[in-house]
Image (spheres, rainbow, N blue to C red):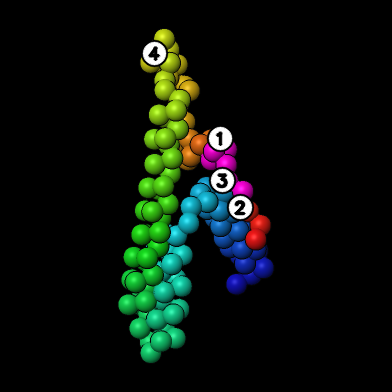
């Protein structure tokens, strides 16, 4: 392979990885992350790579499910405290909508955790 081909492949790989990272959300868990860790753990533990990957994937999916469930609960509490203005048109409500993640962040900002007392 020539130097030009290697540099093109490297540039393409860097671009793909960079674009994938740019669209990634900051959600915990996930099948890939936990599955990779489970595969390594399964490989170390008597060469059960596939079983470890499947178990890790299941745990990652459960973690992400719990995270999103918490977001939906906080978003529902935010909606309860901030009802939609009945005078707004449907178009204005559509333009002013927020995602569950945005609502959960706003709810956390409005309701900070109580400071813990020093012992």
Which residue is the site of mark 1? 110
Which residue is the site of mark 2? 116
Q: Which of marks 2 and 4 is in front?
A: 2
Question: Which residue is at 42% across, 29% downward?
Answer: 79
If the image is split into quadrants, where does the C terminus sit? bottom right
Which residue is the site of mark 3? 113
Element at label 2: loop
Q: Nearer the viewer, mark 1 or mark 3?
A: 3
- Most extreme residue toward the bottom, as rendered? 46
Question: Which residue is at 39% across, 13% downward?
Answer: 86
Determine which quarter of the picture holds residue 49: bottom left
Rendering coords of residue 12 (x, y %): 57, 57
In the rendered view, tell whether residue 53 sits above or below residue 88. Answer: below
- Most extreme residue toward the top, as rendered? 87
* Badge 4 density bin: few <14, some 14–19, many ≥20, Cα 10 Å: few
User: Does label 4 or label 1 sit earlier along the sequence?
Assistant: 4
Rendering coords of residue 60 (x, y %): 40, 62
**Which residues lie in the magenta part?**
108-115
Element at label 3: loop
């Amino acid at each position: 392979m020539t130097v030009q081909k290697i540099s093109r492949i490297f540039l393409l790989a860097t671009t793909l990885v960079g674009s994938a990272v740019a669209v990634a959300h900051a959600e915990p868990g996930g099948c890939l992350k936990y599955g990779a860790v489970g595969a390594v753990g399964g490989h170390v533990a008597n060469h059960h790579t596939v079983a470890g990957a499947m178990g890790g994937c299941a745990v990652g999916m459960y973690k992400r499910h719990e995270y999103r469930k918490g977001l939906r609960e906080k978003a529902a509490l935010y909606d309860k405290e901030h009802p939609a203005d009945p005078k707004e048109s449907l178009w204005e409500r559509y333009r002013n909508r927020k995602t569950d993640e945005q609502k959960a962040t706003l709810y956390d900002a409005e309701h900070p955790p109580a400071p813990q007392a020093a012992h």
